[in-house]
Amino acid sequence: MNQIKIYDVAGAAGVSLATVSRVLNHPEKVRPETRAKIEKIIKELGYKPNLNAKGLASSKSTTVAVVVPELTRSSVAEMINGIADCASKRGYLMRLFVNNRNREAATIANERELWGDVMASGVDGVLYINDEITEEHLDILSEVSVDVVLTNTVCKEPSFPSVAIDYKKAAYDITKEMINRGNKKIWMITTIRKYMVNDLKVEGYQKAMEEAGLQSYVLQVSGKTELNEPAYEEALKNDHPDVAIVVRDSMAVSFINVARLQHIHIPNEMQVIGFQNTRYSELSRPKLTCINNPIYEIGEKSMDLLTKLMEQTLEEGEDLHENIPYEIIWRDSTK
């Protein structure tokens, strides 16, 4: 049986989480008619307030789970640092759960097994980092009995709190900027495997190209260097773009390396832009221009939001879907 959560009550009542929180903790501060409406819905839904959120320190585990797909990416490690620093300040411990099963062969049964382990650990809340959210994932999340915040994870279902950047707008902005600089032949390089985050980047790119009356070209390759390099060699054999926008820094660096072996000068003949600003961008030669995805801050803000949900301390009007500001870091791979 699904456990009703505070944002289920807020959604049914058409009010903010902060209003529901005040009814639970400071009912005298809520207008009688609003309080009566919320109390009625609480009773109808069978909502049971989290004892942890009511400040009963003796019953708190003061531990949160962080669920990640893998640890090999530098972006995930940096995000975890942001989470850990905020958790420490807030007085919470952190337990890491790595879904290191074969991603290509993963099944929903595997995912349910992972979440069974998470819930059995007795955590107060969960930060969920995942490249893609399917309907099956949403079904699993709806059964979770503690608060969950999607961290750097895009989800079209608005009931789940999330912290990320606006990937579609970021891709649109950088494409528009390169068009304004006189570039007409702009490629978008993304992964063959579909990820919602990367799909949004492609959508933003295509929107900017369409508005400018330019032809889009989306090159789909593997996210793994040993597999994507042959695809880059084939794509660059007879032609190259003015600009290549790449969904991951590691893929962008691989693309630069192949281009240089084919004697294409970066940035004089071709400019390349990444989309994370990880350590790869500084190690690249030339150094890689990037959309700065503030990974540490996303982790930090996600933990902050999760804490407010667990402790029911959200302010009136506070957004459950926080878009973190991003910026373009200009380096030597562009003119």
Image (spheres, helix red, strand yellow):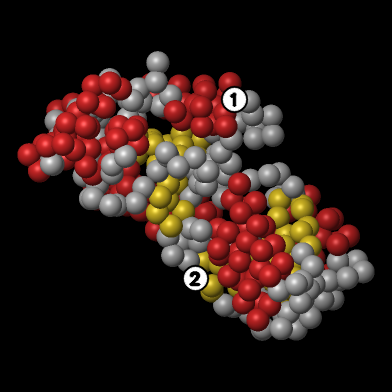
Residue lying at 41% horizontally and 26% vertically, measured from the top left: 144
Q: Position of residue 193 (x, y in %)?
A: 71, 44
**Residue under numbered circle 2:** 327
Q: Position of residue 186 (x, y in %)?
A: 75, 70
Q: Earlier in the sequence, mark 2 or mark 1?
A: 1
> Is disc 2 surrounded by few (<14), some (14 to 19) or many (20+) residues within 10 Å?
few
Q: Position of residue 6 (x, y in %)?
A: 29, 33
Whether tag 2 and tag 1 are in contact, CB under 8 A, the answer is no
Q: Residue furthest left?
A: 28
| Vertical relation: 106 (above or below) 298 | above
Relative to residue 15, is residue 290 drawn left or right?
Answer: right
**Residue under numbered circle 1:** 108
Q: Nearer the viewer, residue 19 or 301?
A: 19
Q: Nearer the viewer, residue 226 or 271?
A: 271
Asked if residue 8 shows in the view, the reply is yes
Q: Residue furthest top?
A: 1
Residue lying at 79% horizontally and 80% vertically, measured from the top left: 269
Relative to residue 210, is residue 172 drawn left or right?
Answer: left
Instruction: Tell me the SS state at disc 2.
Output: strand
